[in-house]
Image: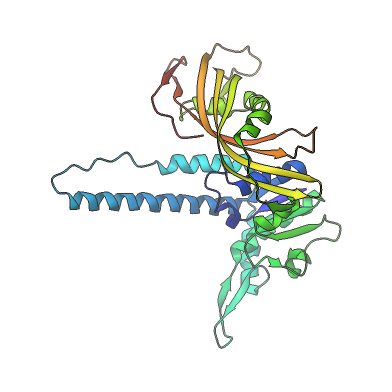
């Protein structure tokens, strides 16, 4: 089964720690579903995220100029502005972790424009108050639909499309417009569109208010979190210099301690006797991490660098099954960790670490 996301769903996810995003990952994991975004959706969401950051930086520039004008003769001291490209790259990395991008297809552009000319759903023709044609719209929507339809038909399994765009939606037929539903082959898997992420997350159950205590996290989560962080790139990625590509490195991580410090947000979903709680929380982690350059294929491991007692802090996203499910363990979803330890690489390939007094941004 596959889940497809529209750009309007991604716009609200700036850190990918949002509970809707965590809950989506839970549904995908429980139902063994893949998550996809058409290439045009990924492009639009990235451009909108970049535009928002650039607008904020422009506001900072204008504010600095106003301060300098208001206090003549005084030097205006400010921190370096955030680097937009770095934050956009990090956002795109988190999107790639969440979802696979459906590749572009040149034929989609041609058919999408033809649909706009002909007013074929999800494209349409616009008219003025007197009913006169004033042009077309919706080629973008049409291109997105064509990419999703192609992938869905190739899988012969159930598909789920999450969107807030009314051009795709019709509540009378599983949420999908009748015209679009009629384009799907009869032997294709079932396909349903959902009017937003909240509609889709109803598959987890009814949303109920919940309070998660730190003691509960401290009892149930550390062993699971230690195991997950030991085999993923979250800790070595936080340690490596930003200019280093994690794909060029091999690592071994030993997590020594995990301690929750704050519950940021939590949400409970109930379905009958089963329930799941999604949690975003802050943690302190201590670990040893060995990092070495990945050797050429067929050769032995090369010497690397062991960094001991690395202290990390940041957010961890996970879900807790109900205590009435004794055999179900908490599940790690993702994390954004930062550390005061940074590993740099010299020109000769050797490495050295630097410990600062201030954590870097979470990665």
Q: Quadrant of residue 111?
A: bottom right
The residue depicted at 52 percent of the width and 15 percent of the height is 308
Q: Measuring from the top left, give residue 333's x and y in whole percent.
A: 65, 37
Q: Measuring from the top left, give residue 329's x and y in whole percent.
A: 74, 32
Q: Residue furthest left?
A: 73
Q: Residue furthest bottom?
A: 130
| Residue 100 in view | no
In-front residue for pair 330/298: 330
Up the image or down, 296 lies above or below 205; here it is above
| Residue 58 in view | yes
Q: Measuring from the top left, give residue 243's x and y in whole percent.
A: 46, 29
In-front residue for pair 214/93: 214
Q: Measuring from the top left, give residue 189's x and y in whole percent.
A: 82, 54
Q: Quadrant of residue 219?
A: top right
Q: Quadrant of residue 108?
A: bottom right
Task: Tell me how the rendering is colored.
Answer: rainbow
Up the image or down, 249 lies above or below 197; here it is above
Judge from the rendering whether residue 294 lies leftward or rightward of residue 49; answer left or right: right
The residue depicted at 64 percent of the width and 50 percent of the height is 37
The residue depicted at 56 percent of the width and 20 percent of the height is 287
Q: Total number of numbered labels?
A: 0
Judge from the rendering whether residue 75 lies leftward or rightward of residue 363; answer left or right: left
């Amino acid at each position: 089964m596959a889940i497809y996301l529209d750009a309007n769903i991604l716009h609200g996810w700036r850190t990918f720690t949002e509970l809707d995003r965590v809950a989506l990952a839970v549904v995908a994991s429980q139902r063994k579903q893949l998550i996809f975004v058409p290439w045009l959706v990924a492009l639009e969401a990235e451009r909108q995220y970049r535009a928002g950051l650039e607008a904020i930086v422009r506001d900072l520039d204008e504010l600095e100029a106003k301060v300098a004008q208001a206090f003549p003769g005084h030097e205006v001291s400010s921190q370096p502005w955030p680097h937009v490209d770095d934050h956009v790259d990090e956002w795109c990395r988190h999107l790639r972790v969440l979802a696979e991008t459906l590749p572009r297809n040149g034929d989609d552009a041609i058919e999408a424009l033809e649909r706009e000319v002909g007013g074929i759903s999800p494209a349409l023709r616009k008219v003025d108050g007197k009913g006169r044609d004033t042009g077309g719209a919706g080629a973008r929507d049409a291109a997105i639909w064509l990419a999703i339809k192609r992938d869905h038909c190739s899988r012969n399994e159930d598909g789920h499309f999450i969107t807030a765009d009314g051009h795709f939606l019709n509540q009378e037929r599983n949420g999908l417009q009748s015209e679009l539903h009629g384009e799907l082959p009869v032997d294709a898997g079932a396909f349903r569109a959902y009017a937003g992420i909240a509609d889709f997350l109803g598959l987890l159950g009814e949303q109920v208010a919940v309070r998660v205590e730190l003691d509960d996290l401290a009892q149930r989560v550390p062993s699971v979190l230690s195991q997950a962080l030991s085999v993923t790139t979250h800790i070595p990625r936080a340690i490596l210099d930003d200019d280093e590509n994690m794909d060029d490195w091999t690592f071994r991580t030993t997590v020594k301690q995990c301690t929750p410090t704050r519950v940021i947000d939590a949400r409970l979903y109930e379905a009958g006797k089963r329930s799941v709680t999604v949690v975003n929380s802050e943690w302190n982690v201590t670990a040893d991490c060995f990092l070495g350059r990945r050797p050429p294929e067929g050769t032995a491991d090369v010497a690397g660098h062991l960094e001991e007692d690395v202290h990390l802090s940041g957010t961890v996203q996970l879900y807790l099954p109900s205590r009435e499910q004794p055999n179900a363990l908490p599940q790690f979803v993702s994390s954004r960790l930062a550390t005061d330890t940074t590993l740099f690489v010299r020109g000769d390939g050797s490495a050295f670490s630097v410990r600062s007094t201030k954590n870097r941004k979470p990665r």
